[in-house]
Amino acid sequence: MPSYTTSDIRNVVVAGHQASGKTTLTEALLFAAGAITSKGDVTKGTTVSDFEKEEKHHGHSIFSTLLHLDHVGRRINLIDTPGSPELSGTALSVMPAVETVMVVVNAHSGIEVVTRRVMEAARERNLPRVVVINMRDAHDPKQNQHLESLVNHIREMFGSECLPVNLPTGNGTAVIECLLNRTGKSDIMDVDSSHQAILDQVVEVDESLMEKYLGGDEPNFEALHDPFEKCMDEAHVIPILFVNAKTGVGVQELLDFMAQWLPSPLEGNQQPFMFDRVVQDHTEETPFEYKEGADSPMFAHVFKVCGDPFVGKLAVFRVHDGKLTGQSHVIIGSSKKPVKLGHVFQMQGKQHVEVPEVIAGDIGAVAKIDEIKLGDVLHDDHKLDTVHHKRDALPVPMYSLAVIPKARGDETKLIGMLTRMAEEDPTFVWHTDKTTHEVVITGMGELHLRFVLERLDARGLHVETKPPKIAYKETILGKAEGHYRHKKQTGGSGQFGEVHLRVEPLNEDDASHTAKGGPGFEFVNEVFGGTIPGQFIPAVEKGVRDVLEGGAVAGYPIQNVRCIVYDGKHHPVDSKEIAFRTAGKYAFMEAIKGAKPALLEPVVKVEVIVPDDKLGAITGDLSGKRGRIQSTDTMSGGYSRVTALAPLGELLTYNAQLKSATGGQGSFTMDFSHYDPAPAQVQQREAAGFKVVHEE
């Protein structure tokens, strides 16, 4: 039995932009709580969190890492996450495991791309947020002025509910509490005014407390705790705290705050789990509520999957009800056969410590059970077979490379390793191109795929790469008919099938909406009189779907098309499924080519942070890349933010171009927005390449 209960647990994601000091801060927290005997150094590769070879080489986090510490009777689980914009999906994917998101802001850099992304994601997921400002060294003469400006900027960006609960004092050598204390001197703001501001915010959610407060009673910890926790749950308060992760200033105070004020699993907002119910002839999705109770049926959610060189596949889970032990027999999702876990672990970086049980609200891991996949629900009651997590939207992978093993015979090994990586990383996918037979990997950007290639190389699989491929799609803007007769006679029973069909955009009354992405495909059977026997209609649809995947114009998937089969012919002896599948395929291709086919290119929303003196050059460059500027905003510290929509194909080498244009001072992030029709020259180029492949 653990020495703590569910009410003693605090689950926290530590997130923020790259170089904000997240890993250094988690190391300082572990050291201050006595979980480690000495602090590691990110630059030396000695931290508990960044233990992978690639992380030590690059000097920053690449994967999310599970950590834990005990402080004043509380078990605090921390998940340290990477801060690169291209790896932000990793931080978002572990949020279902926690009650609180702690966003670390570098006092020197201020609010950056990932800062905003994480704050917005936590708000959308209804998770309480805490902002931790990681201060610079105390000898900086401009630090105090900069910190006060940063607090104001945070409040402007994320709302007036962002309020300090402690403040720097002694020129950044200490912090002074202002949640329960109104006396003392701060470097940047008045302590009494800060105390008053946060009390005014908290008492608004509790009428009884407000009456006492207005009557002159100063609330103590016991009176303030529940209303404060409610304020965090409702985003009525977003606490701001100050630390210096390197020197340790404010670290003990942050530990105390986490233990005393952050919501426990019993107090936090529930994750959106859904329960599928069959009502008459359809399935309805209804919310599923759980209790975080020790005596309830066991219910857990797998939020991370990773590989370990010693124990193999690790599935990391959060228990929401009941408990898990090494002797537990669990049902994985809707599977019918229970699986015995064997051993359960708690993780401290790369260390896996076996524990007798993992209680409700806590985080654990299980090894060597290949059936468990990312996102699975583990339970011990068949009534929960259809319960699933309502998965949050993650960034869409957009940057692709074709990879070819250097050693003959490594193709199977490559596929196995890529499959495992895709299981571990929800923003990484791969597939084999049916036209070129190339293995294509797709991630968030050049840096993301560089890490994938490094992992392959570190595991002894060396590959060559081809230029990046764009995930174009095909569609049609008009209507057309297609016809094909397949007749083959080689002696004995032959093959015969004839198909007449027509195609049209799914949203024919709104061609622009069709081009930008509506429903994918609809197959309609309007054959009357048995001209195509009913048993062959599925074969016709299979032939059509063969073209959907491989394309008819440039070799890319086809979307937003309705296909209507209305006539045909058959032979009582020679008609077979293969004949109608072939006829359906070529009739559909003929129809597509006559229906004003269009190539769709992915358009991304790009956000660029540049020095003010480079703003004009960057906006001009984006316009030259067929970009449409959406907004320009002035930021603190002499920087500006440019938001634009631009074709992904124009930005494949943008990282290097931006660094060159700004002397390494610019940064950018991009997210998928929508699909737009590609220019004629792009469509002609891709179509020409497709013809060459077919000829080959």
Image: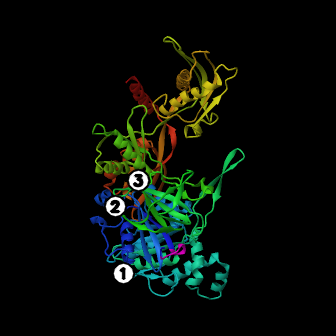
Please determine whether, in this image, residue 586 is positioned above or below residue 134.
above
Between disc 1 and disc 2, whose residue precedes?
2
Residue in front for this viewpoint, 267 or 570: 570
Observer-nearest residue: 680 or 399? 399
Q: Quadrant of residue 242?
A: bottom left
Circle 3 Cα neighbour tier, 10 Å, few/some/many (<14 / 14–19 / ≥20): many
Residue 153, labelled with which disc? Answer: none
Q: Which residues are magenta?
A: 3-8
Q: Quadrant of residue 403?
A: top left
Q: Which residue is mark 1?
A: 173
Horizontal arrangement in the rendering, residue 113 relative to residue 333 (left or right): left
Q: Position of residue 146 (x, y in %)?
A: 40, 72
The residue tagged 3 is 86
> What residue is pinned by disc 2?
60
Q: Who's the residue at 53% across and 82% down the image?
A: 195
The location of residue 650, given as percent across then percent down, is 40, 42
The answer to which of marks 2 and 3 sits earlier in the sequence is: 2
Does the magenta run of residues contain 5? yes
